[in-house]
Image (cartoon, rainbow, N blue to C red):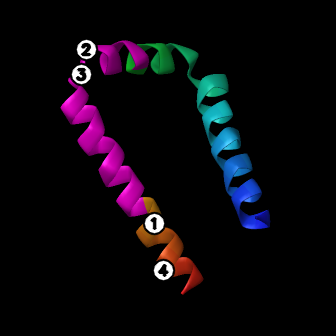
Amino acid sequence: MNDLIVALGLVLAMEGTLYALAPGGMKSMMRSALQTSDQTLRIAGLVALALGVVLVWVVRG
């Protein structure tokens, strides 16, 4: 459970950094995401999920 809280904290820190350093870029990315098909976003999400699981598995293994 401790690792999960640390992981969530890291995600928030990274996202906060992106919004703090490039708010215009984040707005542009959000507009782009709205125009992207659900299927494309779903595939991108699954790829990110798989890469995250593999990364954690490699580091922890």
CB within 8 Å, label 2 to label 1: no
Q: Is 48 placed left or right of 15 in the picture?
A: left
Mark 3 neighbour density, 10 Å: few (under 14) some (14–19) many (20 or more): few
- Crowding at dot 1, Cα within 10 Å, few <14 / some 14-19 / many 20+, comes out as few
Identify whether 22 is placed above or below 16. Answer: above
Residue drawn at x 79%, y 65% as measured from the top left:
2
Q: Which residue is mark 2?
A: 35
**What's the residue at 67%, 24% (across, down)?**
20
Decide: marks 2, 3 in contact (CB < 8 A)?
Answer: yes
Which residue position holds label 4? Answer: 58
Q: Is residue 43 left or right of residue 19?
A: left
| Amino acid type of the residue tagged 4 in the rendering | Val
Q: Rounded to the nearest whole Å, what is the CA distance between mark 3 and mark 4? A: 31 Å
Q: Is residue 32 magenta?
A: yes
The foreground one among 30 and 49 is: 49
- N-terminal of the pair, mark 3 or mark 1, is 3
Specify start and end residues of the magenta stretch as a single range: 30-51
The residue that disc 1 covers is 53
In the drawing, what numbered circle is on residue 42? none
**Helix, strand, or loop for circle 3?**
loop
Of the residues under marks 2 and 1, which one precedes in the sequence?
A: 2
Residue 13: percent from left, percent from top? 70, 41
For the N terminus, the quadrant is bottom right
Q: Where does the image place residue 8, in percent across and percent down from the top left?
A: 69, 49
Where's residue 50, x and y in %?
36, 61
Choose the circle earlier in sequence order: 4 or 1: 1
Q: Earlier in the sequence, mark 2 or mark 4?
A: 2
Query: How far is the residue under mark 4 from the one under mark 1?
Result: 9 Å
SS class of the residue under badge 2? helix
Dominant secondary structure, magenta: helix
Q: Secondary structure at mark 1?
A: helix
